[in-house]
Every structure is written in C-alpha cells, then in structure tokens.
Amino acid sequence: MGLIPPFYTARYMEVHCPVLSFIWLSSGIGVVVWTLLGSLLGRHNYVERQTPNVDVAFWQDRSIDGSWWPKLAPQPSSYCGMNYSVKYSEGQLSSRWGSDHIPCIRPANEPGRYMYTLPNEVRVAFSLAEGSDPQYNSSNVSLYEGIERSTIVFEVSFSTSRESVQHVPNCRVVGASLENTNASFPSRYTQLLPGKDYGEGYLMLSVEDVLLAAGRHFDDLGSEGANPLRLSGLEVVARVDIRNYNVPFRWPLMWNPFGLVPASQTDCTVSLSVLRDNFNVVQWFYEGKRPVGLQHGLRLFVVGTGSIG
C-alpha cells in the first residue's frame, strides 16, 4: 500500500483508498503517455522539417485515344463554325476581333507547334488569330480542333539541404470539381502507357482534364466579353504540395516487419485552380519585327510548397 500514493479530494483531504489512488495514478500516467504518443507519433515531432524546392517538368504526349494527335470524325466538331466577336474602341478608333464563322484547324493536318514548355510552366494553344493586329483587330480566327484530347505529363522533383529527388511518384490531383478532397483525379499514365515507358507513377492528364480539375470546361465562358474558353484560353495555377511525416500514427521506424505504411513516405498532391479566364496570349508570331499572328490558350504554372522531414 505504501507504493500507491494517497488520493486527495478537492478539499485536499487525504483519503487512503487503494482503489481511488490506483485510478488517480493510472489516469495521470495515461494522460502523460497519450500526450507523448500524440506529440511523437501523431505529429511526428521527432523529425526536423524543411520546406522543399519544388520543380515540375512538362512534356506533351499522345492523345487520350492512344495516337499522337486525336483521331477525329470526318465531320467537323460541333464547336467548329462558332460565332464570336468583340469590339474595342479608344477615342475615335475602333476595332473588331472575331468572326461570324470561326473554322477549325486539325493539328494532325497542319504542321506547327501547339504546346510550349518552360521550367514550371506549360502553355497549350487553343486558337489562332492572324493579321497585322491579331490581338485586337482580326477576323481571321481559327480553333484547334481536338487539342483538348492531347495529354501533358508532369514530372515532379524536389530538393532540400539533405536530399534531392528526381521524380516523386503517384502524385494525386485534387481540384475545384472534386466535392470530396480525399478523392483524386485519375492519371491516364497506366491507361495510355501500360509498359510504364518513363518509370513508375507519372502524372498524365489531358488538357481537358486540367480544366475539369480546376472546375471549368472548354464550353464555359470567361469574364471578358463572355469569351468562350475554347477560344480565349485561361490561366491555371497548379499548387504542388510535397510532404512526409504528415499522416498521424504512420510507422515511424526504419525497421518495418509488418509492411506498414512508413511515416517517411512522400505524399504529393496537385491542386488546380483558375487564376484568370480572360484572353490569354500563348505565343506571338512575327515577320521581322511585324506581328502576323498569335495563339490564345492555356497557361499552366506551378507553385511549390510542402514539408520534408
């Protein structure tokens, strides 16, 4: 009985009851142990964390039907021949951009460049305007038919002062179109490349997938003169979040005889959101110093964040 301390009431009266003293002692030990477990295993406070430098490389790959350019029906798509025009005026000057009948160009039949990749950025052309002032005064406007079916491959890498990882596999995409953020937008990589030509777990999305994950669609309208996004393009931000030691009570040790998910496993999440949906210039074309055309389309750029232990 001397090993168990006495139990004290709220009035500091000493009560020598082994049962109450044991309950009091057990409760105190339980609180201390739970606090330590919650801090060490729940929050993984035993690791030093760093913010990683995130980089994403992009490249174009085959379309969603397996061919390089999508296989289109002999008849033009329903959006070919759309009617859209907007007027601009400044003082006595006025101009008109658009046409009553905007035809389509099939990239497979028109050699050219439709996707531009930069560090942490990719641009995809949706339409072409030609003329001496193609941004504000052009009636020679065309759409790129089926460009939404082309795919973009994401290769996510990161570096800290301790390590450098060339490729983070199995990134999952969440966005405004997903009501449950625990769900992910499926990658097309294993479907289109069952042989895993590039390696394990690459993220591959069609251009249409990017818009859908950002909560938009090609047939939606933008905020500048009710512009169709299929014609004007838009800017989308991809927030790439890389973390480990972030899920409570994952297995913390290198020794893992039961094959549990280790706390050191890197989780990669890509969330897409629309930055602006006005006319977005992708590429200018010149003859000498004189502009002769431009492409409007998608600009997708990356913002990296995370915590690596």
Image (cartoon, rainbow, N blue to C red):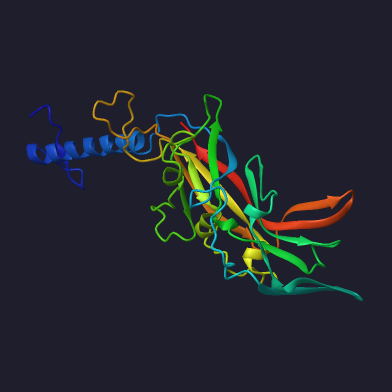
Residue 230: x and y in percent read: 62, 64
Q: Position of residue 80 (x, y in %)?
A: 63, 69
Residue in the picture at 57% in, 57% down: 148
Residue 289 against residue 21 in the figure, above or below: below
Q: Position of residue 284 (x, y in %)?
A: 78, 53
* Residue at 80 percent of width and 67 percent of height: 138
Image quadrant for the N terminus? top left
Q: Residue furthest right?
A: 92
Q: Say which of 150 and 176 sits in front.
A: 150
Describe residue 215's horizontal placement relative to residue 266 as left or right. right
Q: Is residue 143 above or below residue 163?
A: below
Q: Is residue 107 left or right of residue 16?
A: right
The answer to whether one can see residue 119 in this image is yes
Using the rendered image of the protein, determine whether residue 225 is visible from the camera's viewpoint: no
Picture quarter containing residue 91?
bottom right
- Tell me what residue is drawn at x 10 percent, y 27 percent: 2
| Of the pair 107 and 177, the residue shown nearer to us | 107
Residue 59, image x and y in percent?
59, 42
Q: Residue at x 54, y 46 (%)?
A: 62
Q: How many marks?
A: 0
To which quarter of the image does residue 58 belong? Answer: top right
**Res. 249 image quadrant:** top left
Q: Which one is nearer the viewer's eye here, 163 or 89? A: 89
